Image (tube, helix red, strand yellow):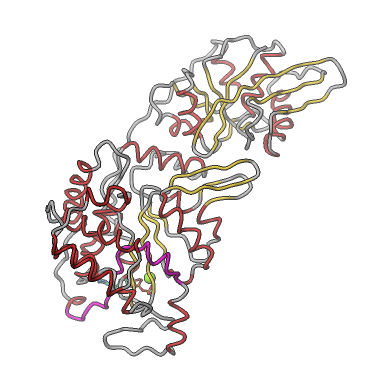
């Protein structure tokens, strides 16, 4: 029996789907089997119409289209094209060996091809399964061409494809052209941020080690402004990171059709009204959430206390694990989510609690209620607590330009190079991801530094997790200054970034 190869996605993994058709005598009917969802079942109507409108016929028989493997759910309209071809092959209206080709695409009733989601992982899956060529809708061709080792053809109409398969017309393969990333002159840069030496230094450390950070400060202090500039000091993405991140965006249907490969670290800033599922991923057809879309980049949570408690709680485990698991009746999928969380908040509802000059109008109870919206476990995971104080008049009115993002990034890159050598041969991306088992091997400390950590641990009532995180931040601070062994000054600075939970949260003695 003739079969046509197509592809499906499970999580981020693309796998081959074989489409086969059988015609049996009996009352004319058309069934699709092999765990199809509603969109796949509707293929029947689209394909039937397209077959008629392109001048072919459906035999008056009992038609069964099988999508194998039968145990994985098939979703979306991607199988229109392979079903169309399978019907033509099995009914003898097309004779051509296409066993080394993979086909995906939605059909319009007239036979034009429409773009589909998840093309990148599907093409990777097809290549790995030994396919030599893929045929995808024209709009998806650039995305598919990112994959090397397989020929990609973009098709706009089924007739163009059939003419090519029958040798009556030519079709040029799409070749990936790595566009030079356009440097926008309006990209936010740290040179526009006046003063704020403390916050700038803390964000440099966060970027250098991939640590999570929480900025606390009065309205207009510059928290959102600082956060928007973090991307400009993060190290460049490797090709593997670009592919991973693009795969997630591909599955979510968010790939830019003209510049499909994501080469700038994502900066996702979901609104605080986002649902827990929007953050972690989910839905009836499981899609990646904001935390996965931020994979290899930054997840910015502005106005942190305004996020629902459940939304904040879903962050906890993925933050630790670097991946998120979503369970549905149809199966369990896992998406990666290795990102830096940067959060910002006011210290109280009016925003001026702890302000050096303005007085706060909130009652202590309201301040407490506001701050208690952020749970201890989440706070524990935010390694650097940054007190963003308002800039002085002299600083804001000064015409002197501050240090540029490019200059800061140079130092970040140097610290990352040290980490790269340290973690060579492992899958650890940065100091923030050192597993507990490696902490002592990677974070050599002087005796004095050790004593200082112990003192802070007792005095601040730190959790074991906070202790680990202080060591990791100290490691990054030492890397930034090119020091091999962690000393008291590195530890002292790292501890200083934990002290906000004392100043504002006052829970710990
Ligand atoms: N250090 C600074 N240098 C230059 N401009 C600044 C600085 N801080 C704040 N501004 C100006 O103030 C504006 C408001 O800052 P921003 O929105 O970042 O404040 P915020 O701390 O996020 O406030 P809110 O708590 O209300 O969200 C910025 O867009 C910028 O124009
Ligand atoms: Mg803001």
Q: What percent of the width, then of the height, locates residue 386?
A: 29, 70
The spot of residue 27 in percent (x, y) is 87, 21
Q: Quadrant of residue 298?
A: bottom left
Q: Quadrant of residue 114?
A: top right
Queried whether the magenta region covers residue 68, the answer comes back as no
Q: Is residue 1 left or right of residue 475?
A: right
State the image quarter where residue 146 is shown: top left
Quadrant, the N terminus: top right
Viewer-side residue, 28 vs 175: 28
Tell whether 105 sits left or right of 110.
Answer: left
Residue 180 image position (x, y, % from top left): 29, 39
Q: Is residue 381 magenta?
A: yes
Which image quadrant shows ligand 2? bottom left
Q: Is residue 429 visible?
A: yes
Q: Which residues are magenta?
A: 374-394
> Percent x, y for residue 24?
81, 15
Q: Give the residue drawn at x 32%, y 36%.
A: 239
Horizontal side of residue 388 vs 294, given as left or right: left
Q: Please indicate, yes or no, whether residue 200 appears anywhere in the rendered image.
A: no
At a point 47% along the width and 73% down the height, the residue shown is: 373
- Nearer to me, 385 or 17: 385
Q: Residue furthest right?
A: 27
Which residue sits at x=24%, y=54%?
Answer: 208
């Amino acid at each position: 029996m003739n079969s046509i190869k197509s592809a499906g996605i499970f999580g981020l993994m693309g796998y081959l789907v074989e489409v086969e058709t059988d015609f049996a005598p009996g009352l004319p009917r058309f069934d699709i089997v092999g765990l199809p969802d509603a969109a796949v079942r509707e293929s029947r109507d689209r394909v039937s119409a397209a077959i008629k409108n392109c001048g072919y016929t459906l035999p008056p028989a009992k038609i069964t289209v099988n999508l194998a493997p039968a145990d994985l759910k098939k979703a979306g309209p991607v199988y229109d094209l392979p079903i169309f071809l399978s019907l033509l092959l099995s009914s003898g209206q097309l004779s051509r060996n296409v066993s080394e080709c993979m086909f995906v695409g939605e059909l319009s009733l007239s036979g034009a091809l429409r773009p589909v989601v998840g093309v990148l992982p599907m093409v990777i899956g097809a290549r790995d399964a030994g396919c030599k060529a893929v045929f995808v809708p024209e709009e998806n061709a650039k995305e598919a061409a990112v994959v090397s080792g397989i020929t990609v053809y973009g098709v706009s109409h089924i007739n163009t494809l059939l003419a090519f398969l029958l040798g009556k017309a030519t079709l040029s393969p799409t070749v990936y052209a790595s566009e030079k990333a356009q440097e926008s002159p309006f990209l936010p840069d740290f040179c526009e941020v006046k003063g704020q030496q403390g916050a700038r230094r803390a964000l440099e450390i966060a970027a250098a080690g991939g640590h999570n950070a929480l900025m606390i400060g009065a309205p207009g202090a510059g928290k959102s402004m600082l956060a928007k500039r973090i991307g400009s000091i993060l190290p460049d993405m490797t090709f593997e990171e670009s592919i991973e991140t693009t795969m997630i965006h591909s599955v979510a249907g968010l790939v830019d059709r003209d510049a499909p490969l994501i080469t700038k670290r994502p900066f996702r800033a979901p609104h605080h009204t986002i649902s827990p599922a929007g953050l972690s991923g989910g839905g009836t057809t499981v899609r990646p959430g904001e935390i996965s879309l931020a994979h290899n980049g930054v997840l910015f949570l502005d106005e942190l206390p305004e996020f629902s408690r459940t939304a904040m709680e879903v962050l906890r485990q993925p933050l630790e694990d670097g991946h998120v698991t979503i369970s549905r009746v149809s199966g369990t999928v896992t998406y990666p989510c290795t990102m830096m969380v940067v959060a910002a908040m006011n210290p109280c509802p009016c925003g001026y609690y702890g302000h050096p000059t303005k007085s706060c109008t909130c009652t202590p109870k309201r301040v407490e209620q506001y701050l208690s919206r952020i749970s201890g476990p989440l706070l524990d995971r935010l390694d650097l607590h940054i007190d963003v104080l308002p800039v002085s008049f002299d600083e804001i009115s000064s015409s002197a330009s501050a240090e540029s993002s490019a200059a800061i990034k140079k130092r970040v890159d140097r610290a990352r190079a040290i980490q790269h050598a340290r973690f060579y041969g492992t899958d650890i991306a940065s100091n923030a991801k050192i597993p507990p088992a490696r902490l002592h091997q990677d974070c050599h400390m002087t005796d004095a530094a050790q004593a200082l950590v112990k003192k802070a641990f007792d005095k601040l009532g730190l959790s074991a997790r906070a202790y680990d995180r202080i060591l990791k931040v100290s490691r990054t601070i030492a890397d930034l200054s090119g020091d091999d062994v962690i000393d008291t000054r590195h530890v002292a600075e790292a501890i200083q970034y934990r002290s906000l939970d004392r100043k504002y949260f006052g829970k710990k003695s």
